[in-house]
Amino acid sequence: MFRPIVSSVLRSSASKNVIKSSSKISLIVNGTSSMMINNNNILSIQKRGIKTLDFGGVKEEVIERSDYPKDKYQAIFAKDTLAMLGYGTQGRGQALNLRDNGLNVIIGLRKDNKPNSSWEKAKSDGWVEGKNLFPIDEALKRGTVIMNLLSDAGQSMTWDQVKPHLTKGKTLYLAHGFAIAFADQTKVSPPKDIDVILCAPKGSGTTVRSLFLSGRGINGSVAVYQDFSGKARERAFALGIAVGCGYLYETTLKKEAVSDLTGERGVLMGMIEGAFRAQYKVLRDHGHSPSEAFNETVEEATQSLYPLIGANGMDWMFANCSTTAQRGALDWAPRFEKALAPVFEKLYSEVENGNEARRTLDLNSRSDYKEMLRKELDEIKNSEMWRAGQVVRQLRPENNKW
Ligand code: NDP
Ligand code: MG
């Protein structure tokens, strides 16, 4: 209970360096006492440092929002123009957060006046052509920190256009290690006289934005690939917080890329859709209604159990369900683990050996990619399970318009 209290105290007034509090606290940061509350209930931050915490027995350093208050990152980037290339969900979320955090941000996009294009989306969010919205080349010219958040395939396709603008002393910022981890395929090879840094928020760009707007922050990883300035690490941490992260852990570009591709193909999306489908089908094959199959497979998971697991952990979940559910789930978990472990091993090796990157680049670079994708997504949307889901969602009292 101790840490959250300290964190929230810090978050609320970190920029003031002086914090009022009603309890007596001292916190050890990397072996040195960095904050103390005196008898007047004033907490003074004597010297902030990166905190080392115990993650289930393994010590790791973390960077928190309180380490980089607004005035600190504004000072670090006071002379910079942050050029955000791309306005997908992640580009949009990060760019808007940076703008709201008072940094000098411009957007670089291919100009396309189709209603759904990134260019039009940016305009509707208030970016103004010629002021802070430019064609990619112009943004590259003006930017000192090039935030390349084009799609991963797009980063490879446009590399010859981007590279000449990465002149000495500039910074290349990425949100995914993909381009560099699989450089043999993407051909992305930054010049040696720039900084190359990464911050990869661990969630959708939509969440990057919504958490920021509600005063919260997404977790993210941060990495330095090249430190030409000698300040790359500091700048990576500061930018990670400025784009909206709540806490950051350090990694490498390769590790970020491999874990990210594994996660999204695995438990985060690929495996979960596979597991939903498999269980739904078994229930339907045995005569259960769509309502019953969907509620027992998806709705109860997303509406009740997953949020509880998120809030309290799996041990709590096992402890706070019926004894019948508890016994069965504890017994079946190892069976699923055994069945799934070889699939995850295979997945990891396909990611690590670059096959997944190759497939992504090949398919996502095709001119008919969006058309192919639409067909695949329509198939999912039109499946009985997800059509049943549409009805179930409409029946949630807050959505019920009937
Ligand atoms: P997308 O992957 O959806 O990419 C979309 C953007 O790239 C659009 O602005 C699109 O412009 C542009 N683009 C694609 N190809 C080209 C090209 N050849 N020339 C010019 N522009 C191009 O964007 P995201 O925001 O989802 O991802 C951006 C980066 O962030 C990626 O590295 C991704 O891995 C990373 N990331 C994404 C997360 C997420 O939540 N989505 C999470 C964490 C990291 P147009 O509209 O004109 O086609
Ligand atoms: Mg990803």
Image (cartoon, grey):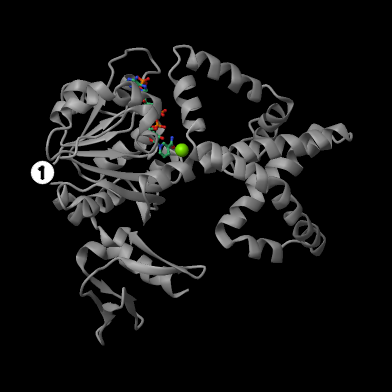
Residue found at the far bottom of this picture: 39
Image location (x, y in percent) of residue 385? 72, 30
Residue at point 62%, 51% (across, down): 306
User: Residue 307, relative to residue 147: is it above or below?
Assistant: below
Q: In what element is the residue under mark 1?
A: loop
Q: Position of residue 323 (x, y in %)?
A: 80, 64
CB of residue at label 1: within 8 Å of ligand 1? no
Q: Which quadrant holds residue 138? A: top left
Q: Amino acid at mark 1?
A: Lys
Residue 70 relative to residue 323: left or right: left
In the image, 268: left or right of 248? Answer: right
Q: From where the camera sits, is residue 135 visible?
A: no
| Relative horizontal placement of residue 15, taking residue 381 as reference (left or right) | left
The answer to whether residue 186 shows anywhere in this view is yes
Residues 117 and 214: in front is: 117
Closer to the camera in the image, 11 or 136: 136
* Residue denoted by label 1: 79
- Up-down relation of residue 220 to residue 56 (above or below): above
Q: Position of residue 390 (x, y in %)?
A: 66, 30
Residue shown at 17% from the left, 50% from the top: 74
Residue shown at 55% from the left, 42% from the top = 348
> Could you tell me residue 21's position as x and y percent?
32, 76
Q: Quadrant of the C terminus?
A: top right
Crowding at mark 1 (Cα within 10 Å: few <14, some 14-19, many 20+): few
Q: Is residue 60 left or right of residue 315?
A: left
